[in-house]
Image: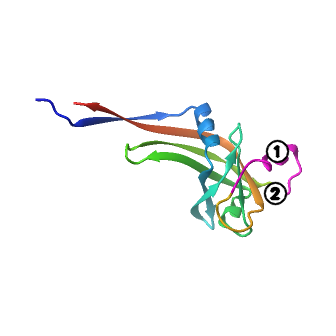
Amino acid sequence: MMSNSTKSERFSESLGRDECLKLLRQGSVGRLAVVIDGKPHVLPLNYAADEDGVIVFRTADLTAATDAALANVAFEVDEIDLARRQGWSVAVHGFAREITEAIDDDSKRLLRMPVHPWAPGQRDRWFKITPKEITGRRLRSTASAS
């Protein structure tokens, strides 16, 4: 007698830098992790990433995201398929600084990147995260009939 049950095997793999950069550039929503007054905070925000993994985001005055200035931060993007129990995540560890009024050529280039905040109100303060480390993982599930 044959069974119609499905067995699922899970595979976890590290993603190479090129794959991490590709996934990072495809996204527009991620999470910024920053320490404020000794406590970790995770903030969802809209972003853009360049070919080297530099992340740019905009925020308003006096938001928690402004505390990222001149700080070591983490930034994460992911995609999750709940039904299939699989997905991927990319984490960037780096240093953040404000570039709103910067006049160097690199900052001018970053200020032209397409960052479209969903949050209401003025989002005139621009920040960049320069990556020190970019890592990623993918969890896959393969189903086989038994």
Indicate the amino acid at tag 1. Arg
Instruction: Answer with left or right where residue 128 lies relative to residue 90.
Output: right
* Magenta stretch in the rendered image: 100-116
Q: Secondary structure at mark 1?
A: helix
For residue 139, what is the image quadrant? top left
Instruction: Answer with left or right where residue 107 lies relative to residue 142.
Output: right
Mark 2 sits on what residue? 100
Q: Is residue 17 magenta?
A: no
Question: Which residue shows up at 57% across the image and 49% down it?
Answer: 76
Vertical arrangement, residue 121 with respect to residue 46, above or below:
below
Residue at far left of view: 1
Question: Which residue shows up at 60% across the image and 52% down it?
Answer: 29
- Position of residue 115 measured from the top left corner of the image (x, y, whole percent): 71, 52
Mark 1 sits on what residue? 109
Residue at far right of view: 103
- Majority secondary structure of magenta residues: loop
Indicate the amino acid at tag 2. Thr
- Position of residue 84 measured from the top left corner of the image (x, y, whole percent): 37, 43
